[in-house]
Amino acid sequence: MANMREIRSRMKSIQDIMKITNAMYLISSSKLKKARKNLLATEPYFEKLQSTIHDILVRAPHMHQIYFERRENIKTSDRKTGYLVITADKGLAGSYNHNIIKRAEEEMAKTPNNCLFVVGQVGRQYFTRKNIHVDCEFLYTAQNPSLFRAELISETIIELFTAGRLDDIYIIYTKMVTPLRSEVQVAKILPLERMKFERRKAGYQHAKFDPSPEEVMNHLVPNYLKGLIYGALVESFSSEQNARMTAMEAATKSAKNMIRELDLLYNRARQASITQEITEIVSGAKSLKK
C-alpha cells in the first residue's frame, strides 16, 4: 500500500487537474453561447438573400448564371473536386476531430481529382502526417469564426470555380442537431442547385432588378456563399465547444471519483499507521515491564 505522502501528492495533482477541466468547461460554455448568439443575429440577412435569389430564379428562369453551371460535359473521372474541411485548432474535444477527419477521408476516396482546403490546425497536421497535400489552409479561423474570415474563404473558392480549376466544391463540417448531439454534414457549395431555391415557401414578389437580374445575381451569390460558409464555421465551432464541454465534464467526474478512492486509501493508510504506532507502544511497554 502506498504511504500517506504519496497518496496526498496524487490527490493534490488530481485536484489541480480537476480545476483546469472545470475551468475549460465553463470557458467552452461561454464561447458556445456567444457563437450561437452571433449566428442568430446574422440569420435574417442571409435568409433574405436566399429569398431574393429565389425571386430572381422565378422571374428569369432561363437566365445564364455561372454559379449554377453543372458542367455535365466533363467526365466524372476528369472532374476536379474541392473539399473544405473544418476541424478544430486543438484537441481535448472527445471524438469531434476524429469524426470529421474520418468523414473527409471517406468523401475524398470517392473522387479521383481532389483539392483540399483545411480550417483548423488539427486537420492540417493530420493530413500533413498522412502525406496528403493541403492546397490551402485558413489559419486562426476555427477559434474565431467571423464574416470577414468567411468572406476570405468564399472568395478563394469562387475564384477557383469561376476559373474552371474546380468543378464541384463541398464543405464538410459538424452541425449541432441537438444540445447533446452533433453530426458530420457534407454540403455542396458550388455549383448551386436551382431546386434548392425553388423549393422555398417564399412567395413571388414583383420586383425590378437593376441593372439586370444577372448583375444582381452576381452580387447576391457571393454574399450568400459567405453566409453559408459562416454558418458552417459557427456550427462547427459550437459543436467543438459542446464536445469539449462533454469531455471536460466527464474528466471532472472521473477526477472526483479518483479523489474519492484515494481518500479511502489515505484513511486506510492512516489507520494502519496509527495501529502500527499503538502496537509499537504496547510492545515497548511490555518490554519495560519485563
Image (tube, rainbow, N blue to C red):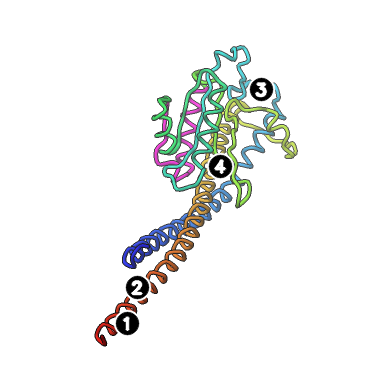
Q: Going from the N terminus, do you reach mark 4 or mark 2 first? A: 4
Image quadrant where residue 67 sits: top right
Q: Residue type at mark 2? A: Ser
| Residue at the far front in the pictured view | 290
Q: Residue type at mark 3? A: Met
Q: Residue 63 carries which label?
A: 3
Q: Going from the N terminus, do you reach mark 3 or mark 4 first? A: 3
Up/down of 14 relative to 275, above or below: above
Look at mark 1 in the image and give the residue it sits on. 282
Q: Residue 231 carries which label?
A: 4
Look at mark 2 in the image and give the residue it sits on. 273
Q: Going from the N terminus, do you reach mark 2 or mark 1 first? A: 2
Which tag is nearer the camera, tag 4 or tag 2?
2
Tell me the distance, in whole angstroms, between the alpha carbons under discs 4 and 2.
Answer: 62 Å
Which tag is nearer the camera, tag 1 or tag 4?
1
Instruction: Pick the residue in front: 131 or 256.
Output: 256
Q: Going from the N terminus, do you reach mark 1 or mark 4 first? A: 4
Tell me the distance, in whole angstroms, between the alpha carbons under discs 2 and 1.
Answer: 14 Å
